[in-house]
Each structure stands twice: as C-alpha cells, then as structure tokens.
Image (tube, rainbow, N blue to C red):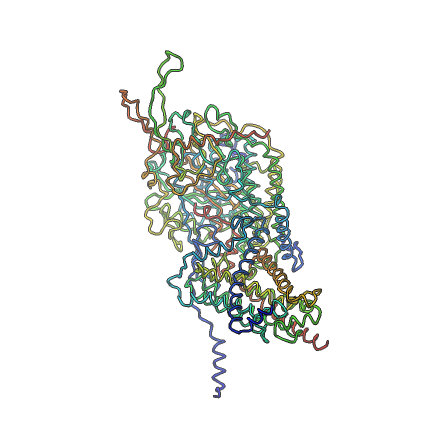
Amino acid sequence: MTTKTTERRVLPGMGMVKGLWVTIYTMFRTIFRPGKYLATINYPVVKETPVARARGVIALDQEACTVCMLCARQCPDWCIYIEGHKEEKEPDKPGGRIKVRNTLDRFDIDYALCMYCGICVEVCPFDALFWSPEYEYSETQMGDMLHDMDRLQGWLATVPPDPELEK
Amino acid sequence: MVLDQDLVRHLSEASVSVELETPEMTLNIGPQHPSTHGVLRLVARVDGERAFDVQPVIGYMHRGYEKISEVRTYPQVTTLVNRIDWVSGYANEVPFIVAAEKLLGVEVPERAQFIRLILTEMARISSHLIFMASYPLELGAATPLFFALRERERVLDLLEGVTGGRFHPNFNRIGGVKPAYGSGSATRKVIQDLPAGFFAETRVAMDKVLYAVDELDALVADNEIIVARTKGVGILPPDVAASFGVSGPNLRASGVKFDLRKVEDYLPYHLFDFEIPVGENGDCWDRWHVRLLEIRQSVRIVQQAIDGIPSGPLQAKVPKIIKVPLGETYVRAENPKGEMGYYLVSNGNQGPYRLKIRTASFSNISILPWILEGVLIPDIIAIMGSLDFVLGDVDR
Amino acid sequence: MTSSPSETETTVHPLQEYADRVAEAVGGTAEITFDTIKVKVPSEQWVSSLTTARDDLGLIFFSFLSAIDWSSEVAVGDPFPEEVEDRLELLVTLGDLSEGRRVTFSTDLDQESPAIPSLIEVFAGANWHEREAHEMFGIDFEGHPNLIHLYLPDAFQGNPLRKSYPLLSREVKPWPGTVDVEAMPGSDDEEEPEGPSEENPEA
Amino acid sequence: MSFLTELFSNFWVSLVGKLLIVALMIPLVGMVIGFAEIKLSAKMQARMGPYFAGGRWGWAQLIADGVKFFQKEDLIPDQADRPVFKLAPVLVLVSTVGLLVVIPFGPDLIFRDLSVGIFYALAISSLSTVGVLMAGWSSGNKYSLMGGLRAAGQLIAYELPLVLAVIGSVMLAGTMSMSGIVEAQIAAGYPYVILQFLGFGIFMIAALAELSRIPFDMPIAESELVMGYLTEYSGFRFLFFFLAEFANMFSLSAIAVTLFLGGYWLPGIPESVLPYAGPVILLAKTFLLVFAMIWFRWTFPRFREDQLQSLAWRWLIPIALANILITGAFKVYL
C-alpha cells in the first residue's frame, strides 16, 4: 500500500473547499447539537469523574502500617519519609503475651518529588497504601506539597472500590 | 539640468551587475521556540531567509538515564524508561522488559502478550495523533489540532482505565503485566486485569479515531496550500536515511518497506494482518501521509487483538526479588517514532550493569544539518516538524 | 525465531550459520548471546571490517555506536560477582533493511587512553554517536571533524558513564530508607538501627 | 431631526461629534469582531470558547482582555529605538481610523463624502505598511526584524492587486466617490459583483494579505517568528495592534461591500426607508465578509514567502489587468 501521490486526483480548488466544508459543518454541529459534539466542559462548574484506577493521590491506612520501610526503600525518587517507634500492645486474649508493635510517628510523602509510579502501593505487604483518583490538591507553595500522616489518612475516604473486570 | 547619458547608463548597469552583498546573520532557533518540539536549539547562519549552515545544539534535556539506571532495580528502571518518549509512554517499556525476560528466560503468558500489544498500539495511535495535531499547526492551520486531540483523549482514557496512568503507565512487570493491586494479604487478590466494558469502549473509541482520521484527511491532505508547502520539500533519499540511522515512518516515507513489527518477535505481531504504508518520494507530505495511514493500520490491529484475546494468567511465575543472570542482549522494537532498542548488560544483581538506550529521534534529527542545507526558514520549520521527534527521545 | 535463552550444545542457534558467514567475511569471531549476534573484531581492522559489512553484507542501517566499561571495582551500582578483566568495549550495531538482520560489532580498547579511527566516512550517522561516546567514555576518535561535547555543557569535566565516576546526586541527599524505629522507651536493648547498604538494599 | 442638523451645521461641533463617534466605534467594532472570532473559531473546533467572562456565554471576554492589556506593564526592550517603537502602533491605528471616513453607512450618513473617496482609502490603508515596518525594525530583535521585512514585502506586493481590483467597479460607476458608486449601483439595479466577480475575488485575497491574516500571515507567523513584528509589544501598545487588526477587517470589508455588494442598498428596499435601514444592511453584509475571513483563518495553513509573492505577481496582477480590459471593453461596447 504505497501512498501513491498520483492516485489523489483532486480538482485544483477542491482541496481547500473540502477543508472549508469540514470546519463549517463542525461549527454548525457544535452550535446546534452541543450535547453530542461539544468536546470541552466548563471545568469548575462541570467536573469529569476520573477512571477508578486513576493514580491521583496515595492514601495511607495508619493502623495497617507496621513501619517496615519497604515503600520508602523501593521509591525511585526517595520521596517517602517515615519515622516510627516500638510500643506495647495489650494481648488479644487475656493473659496472652504482651506484643510489641511498631507505630508510626511520621509518614510524609513529598508530592513535589513523587512521580506517581505506584511502586510503593504495589510493594506494601500490609495493605496500608491505596490509590485514590483525587487530583485537586495543588498548592501555591511547593512546601505544602509535603502531605503528612493525617492528610494521607484523610485521602483514604476517597479510595474507590475496585472496578469489576472484563470476563 | 541635463543628465549625461553615460552616467545614467553606468548607474543602471552598476546596480544590475553588483551582487547585493548582505552580511549573513546568525539566527538562534530555540531552545525556547514554539516549534522545536522541546528544548532543541538550531544555530543557523542565515542570508536573508535562506539558512545555509544549521547546527543543532542538543543536551538541554539530558537527564542521564543510562547512568541512573545503573543504580536502580528493574521495576524502578521501568518507571524511568517510559519517560523517554513521553508522547508514547507505554511503548518504551516493552523492549526493556522483553530484554530482561530474554536474559531470565521467562515465557510471558498469552494474555499478557495480547494486553501489551493492545496498549502498545494505543500508544502508537496517541503518538501519531499528536503529530497529526502539531504538524498542521506548524504550517499555520490551527483546526486539525482539536480534531486530533479530541480523539487522543479517548485513547488515553482507555490507557488510564487499564494501567492507571495516561502518559507513564508503568504497567509492565518482568514476566508479564502488573498482576495485582499490591502485595498485601487483601490487595494481592485484586487482579489488575482489563476493567469491565473495556472492549466495548475500545470499539467505540477506535471508530471515533477512524472518523477523526477521515476528517483530518479531508482537512489537510489535499489542501492546496499544504501541498504547496510540503510536497517536494525536505526530500530524504533512502540511502542517506539508512547511513544516518533514520528509522520508522521517516524511513518508510522514503520508500523503504521495513517495519520491525514484521521482523522482530518482541510482541506477537505475526498473529495479526496489517500492512506497512510506504511513501514514494520521501518529502514532508509523504512523512505526514504515512503516519496517517499507520493510524488506520494500528486501529485494525487493536480491533483484531480485542476479538482474539485469550484468557489466562497476567504474569508468569517470577520470584519476588528478581536477579537477572549474567548476560547481554539487544532488543529493538518499532516505536511510533522509529526503532527503539535497549542493549542490556546484567551482572546478576537487581539492576542492570549497563543499559544503552537507542532512541529513534536521536538518529532522526542527526540528519538535520544535511537536510536543512540552503533551505528557507519556513521550510526549516516544515521539515523539522515532519520528522516528528521529541526532545526527551533525543537527549535521554 | 523464538528466544532460546542459553544455547544448549545440541540445538544449533538458527542464526549461527549467518553469524559465521559475517564473522568470516569481516575477519572477527562470532558469538551468539540471547539472539544477539556479536562479532568481536580486532581494533586495527575496525574501519575496514565495517566497510566490508556495509558493502558486501548489505548491513547499511547504522543503528547505534556505544561503549561498555567493564571494570571490577565500581563507584556506582553493584560490582560483578566474579572477577572481570578491565577493558572498554566499543559497540556498533548495524542492520539491513531487507530481512531485518542485525549484527553488533565490538572491539576492545584499553581503559586509560582509548583511541580508535572514526567511522564518519563509512557511516555519516556515526558523527553524533561518536561525539557522545567521546564525552561519556573519553574515547578519542581520530579523524572526527568536530569532537566537541554533544550533551554535556562545555565546561563539564570527567566522563560520566565510566564506572569510576560517582553519581553525585545520591551522595547529597540522605537515604530515606534507613529504618529509624527507636527502641521501646526505657528498654535495655540499645541495638542501633540496622542500616542496609547505601545503595539499593537487600529488601 | 431638525434640531440635530441645525446643531451639526456648526463645523467645529460636527467635527468633535464625528471624532467622538470614530473614537467610540473603533474599540466597539474591534471588540465585536474579536469576540465573534473567538467564539466562532471555538465552535469550528468543537470547543465552547470563553464562558466565564461576563456571565452567560462570555460576552465580556474582550473587555476583560482590554483591561488586562491596559494594566499590563508596558515593556520597551533596551536595544529598541524608543521613539520609533512608540510611534509604530499609532501609525497603524491611524490608517484604520482613516478608512472609516469614507464608508457610506446610509444615503447621506457618511463622515466626509470625498470626491476621490476610494483613491483616498487605498492611500491611507498603505500607511499601515510603514507602521508595521517601523515596529519590526525598532524592536531590536532578529525575529521582529524578519517579521517587519516580510510584512513590507507582502503589503507592497499586495497593494497593486488591491488597487487594480478596485478600478473595475470604479469604471462601471464612473466616479470615485464612495456614495457615488453606491448610487450608481442603485441606478444600475444590480450590485457590481455580478460583473466584477474577478475584481471582488482579487480584492478579498489582497485584503486578507493587507491584514496579514492566514493564509497570508507570514509577518506574524507564530510557529516560525514567535510573533513576528509584534514579539516585543506588550501592554496597551499591543492593544493598538490588536484593535487595529480587527477594525481593519471591518473597514476593508465595508469598502469591499460598498464597491462590489451594493453598500447600504438591497434590491428590494424602497428609497424612503434607506436612511434608517442603510447602516443595518451595510453591517450585515460586512459581517458576512468578516465571517468569511474568520472561516478562512481557521481552515487554511499559511503560505511560504516565495509562494506568497509569486501568487501576487504571477497570478493576481495579470488577472486584475485582464479584468480591467474586459470591463473597459464591456463599458465601451455597452
């Protein structure tokens, strides 16, 4: 299939007329049937809902996190900073052994550095990190892009259920 | 006051015979310029409108990927690698992962290969649609941009639906495709297969892409002004193209019927029938038209792949911490911009020992000094636009 | 040609016959690793062998030219498990535009002062590749018209892609992966927080 | 109406009145056409166009732009030739204002009915060439210089077809005064475009080139010369150029309407109602031509320099000359 330039026999002026026809019928189509043909939306008034798996922001579940530091190690951009301490937890069954448990002191993700690759969410062995398709958290100062523990916990509410799969 | 005749004659001849000596001017096109596709700088010695010595200066966007990849593990390099040609993010990951799988000797399951193929062809469609949008804009026509980008959004939404990322999907894993949401007890069971309704949406999107391609064809292909601006401009003979390493649509536009998808086995292209559009005389118009026809071929491939996709696991049996055994291999793939290859040398650790990234745009624009010799400035923009390069691809 | 990972003795690699033909025509030794034909050529015949490859064998497509710095002690990344002989290997990959074959030609240069004649007369495309190899590995290409920096700023010192060249950005920022979980308040086991190796850790 | 005519009889009062009307008309016309361009081009591209400026569908977008340009800092590059840099936009706007003087909006609704109406209009419109060249030269940057030189070459090359195209209808009408041409068309009973379609075509193409709009926008080729001779202009100086372009579109279309499409007259309109319906008809026809310009702008790419020049010298001028010959023969034979 060659792009035979000779096979495109077109009258001298017709090329431009075809172009004009395309723009004019797009204009009338967009004016009279905007629902079907208008491609843009008015952003703050009308908002598009992102897909379920969209990687907008990372949400943290503090109870699940055991400060194993795997996510901080695997992150290519070194943008997760974690500090924790050991703490006693009363045993499940009365008289059981006192269990020592790691609890988080600090879990910051610097979204100014993060490249949304998703390695941390994938590598976390304790279901502590989730993706949420939220995207409206831009800041005026770059420093505010450092989300602390509680803010990441706040995103947990916006994590969507997993989409059903193709049969 | 009677003018003496020979003075008049002398003056008239003088003006005719003396060649107007205008000093030539050095014009910097870029690195901050509306149509250099990124931060490319052309230092052009210009006489009036004609440029006769154009030297590209690159490196403004050199991120040193080959050095960084020596300290990264394989999953981390995948996130690095899909940022080289960000217009077709997914297509960059595939050859790197196939190279690692070759060294490991891992057989990728059938379904994962099909998903990879569908997403690579979608990345090709989105890359060619960006070209369909930006090239007429460089010639002055603003409307095709919106037709092309409107359909590109549909394709990117599909990519985002499956992988979660529009430009940088990071969806490839050694041995197949990303199997599960996470590795926790609950998230391990959440399979990252194609979301429900993906096939239906893809069929609708592919029809819309075909419709938009017809609209672009009507709007741009036979337009007398575009034909006048691009036909016979920037002719690239096949032998010069080969010696510079120009590949992909630019090479096929010069009449060379060579497509890596038919030759290499990095993805199961042999299962589908598609044609390779070839240009005739290698000028800007042919380079534009070959890409337009390639979109139609990619749509055909995607439609066939959707109908024939088998079910099965998403990833082969692969240990959690992957150590690739000693060895070196070169895998090359047909990226939308041309031949993209990875020369991977591994030393048995978690990351590559040395990774040479052969990118298409680097060789495609190394031809600029040759092709822009004695060319008018509007043609510099037309020829550069027709080569369809991206600076991330050039500078790595 | 499905990928057969390592070539067992019995099955002969489908490309073996072609590889031998190329090696014999070019005067080098052929070796097939993971579907990649690699022909090692002595560095004196570098330009002549590539010219014969281009003219007689039809390998007219110049894919890329680069180098690999084989050295045992490395300032960056993890070293080789077993000993490796220190050398700087120059690579050129050529392809043909009919059956889609590709052959990688390589030659060894010494690490201290690598030098080799330039390929510009054979392949015009080698210009930029050689400039990049020059600034990244310090290889001197004799006969190259303007062997100046391609990517790096002019005032840049050193050859970044050499294994002896450290990756500075990793020295500056402390590694966030060191586990700092303080021990229980008042407990006696004062084991200092274990910090795995500076680079990528054994997870 | 009598009180008005008596008041206007005093020369100075009518002069100030006319100046006020023009001072009001230029920004108004510029805004309306600018807004039409923004909204229509959006619709042509399946977009919505401005929406939030001024409530429902963004009618105040250009007022907002105007305010933005005014409060923007007015930069003058240090290598610029300051006086020339400051004077250039004024010159371009003056040529636009000058054109409005001779446009007949109604039977006697004309600022000044010059006997050499069309000749004066063409002379004034070539004044903007000097302004553009001054802008290109004085900005002190290579891209502006190239934009200015391209503009000079283009505007001069298209001055000729513009003038030659006009001669056809002037010959038919027998007079050069604009209202005289319209009255001649009323008397003849048909707009001259029927006989002068060649002239009309050439006039429109040359008008597009005068305005340096696509497909002839080499001087402001965004993708090559960043913004051509406008690169260094900002603040209200850029507003001058911005308004001048749209107002020029209006005035050149109005001249085209007067010469070829029968000015303020429609075949079916009785004489008595013309003074009132005249302006409306003229504006409607002018807007039709302006819409065609917008339509061309958002469909076609731009020519290359040499194609642009060869189109003018090798095609437009010979056809215009032929048109004059035919009209002459037709006039003599008739």
In the image, is D220 to the left or to the right of A32? left
Query: How far across and down, in percent of the image, does residue B277 sit?
Result: 60, 47
Image quarter for residue B109? top right
* Residue furthest right as drawn: D334
* Residue furthest top as drawn: A95
B11 relative to C86, above or below = below
Q: Is residue C19 shown to the viewer in this render?
A: no
Q: Is residue D174 shown to the viewer in this render?
A: yes
C77 relative to A7, above or below = above
Query: How far across and down, in percent of the image, does residue A108 sit?
Result: 38, 33
Nearer to the camera, D43 or A166: D43
Query: How far across and down, in percent of the image, does residue D186 sit?
Result: 68, 70
The image quadrant where one finds the C terminus of chain C is top left
Residue drawn at x 58%, y 47% as measured from the top left: B257
Nearer to the camera, B72 or D30: D30
* Residue furthest front as drawn: D3
Image quarter for residue D192? bottom right
Query: How far across and down, in percent of the image, does residue D68 sit?
Result: 46, 55
Nearer to the camera, A145 or B376: A145
In the image, is C91 to the left or to the right of A52? left
**Number of numbered discs overlaid on the protein picture:** 0
The image quadrant where one finds the N terminus of chain C is top right
